[in-house]
Image (tube, helix red, strand yellow):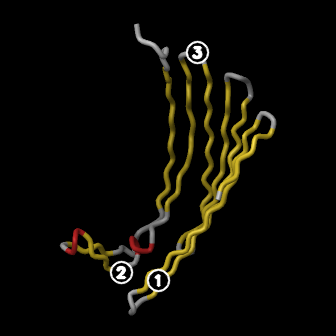
Amino acid sequence: TQWSIPVGEHYLTVGAAYEKQQLDNRQFLFKNTQWSLYAEDEWYLTDLLALTAGLRLDDNDQFNTQLSPRLYGVYTLNHHWTVKGGLSTGYRAPSLTEMEGDWVQESCNGRCEVFGNPDLKAETSVNTEVGLYFVGDDTLT
């Protein structure tokens, strides 16, 4: 669920997510719950400059709680050119089918089996972006 609202020179977005997974193969019952909360503020400092800051909090039964921040900027040089850049972090916990070693799933129309790996860890990432963007006129001559 997500809500967005303009507040003056800011555009605020907040949201939450909840996921409950369960695998039952009559011998084993696996359960996992994950919830997330996030907030983002897109701040228009001028007509040419916008900054976005955000935070996401993830909590998973199988892994630690993770906080993922984000900072991004957009500066319009003129009608054709824009500079964009930012830094963000990411987090992804494995699903139950990916990490349960006692769970076997048929795939490939029954020609292969997919086994879970109990040694999987949650993934984290650090992402950077810097770009110069050009938008031409609507007509070609």
Residue at the image point whose x is 36% and y is 73% from the top: 117
Badge 2 amino acid: Trp
> What label does residue 30 carry, if any?
1
* Residue bearing the label numbered 2: 103
The percent position of residue 114, horizontal first and vertical second, equals 29, 73
Q: Secondary structure at mark 2?
A: loop
Q: Secondary structure at mark 1?
A: strand
Residue 33's quadrant in the figure? bottom right
Label 3 – label 2 distance at C-alpha: 56 Å
Is 85 or 4 nearer to us in this picture? Answer: 4
* Residue bearing the label numbered 3: 79
1 or 2: tag closer to the N-terminus: 1
Residue at the image point whose x is 45% and y is 69% from the top: 95
Residue at the image point whose x is 63% and y is 40% from the top: 71
Q: Residue furthest left?
A: 111
Is 79 or 61 nearer to us in this picture? Answer: 79
Q: Secondary structure at mark 3?
A: loop
* Quadrant placement of the C terminus: top left
Badge 3 amino acid: His
Asked whether the viewer can see residue 109, the reply is yes
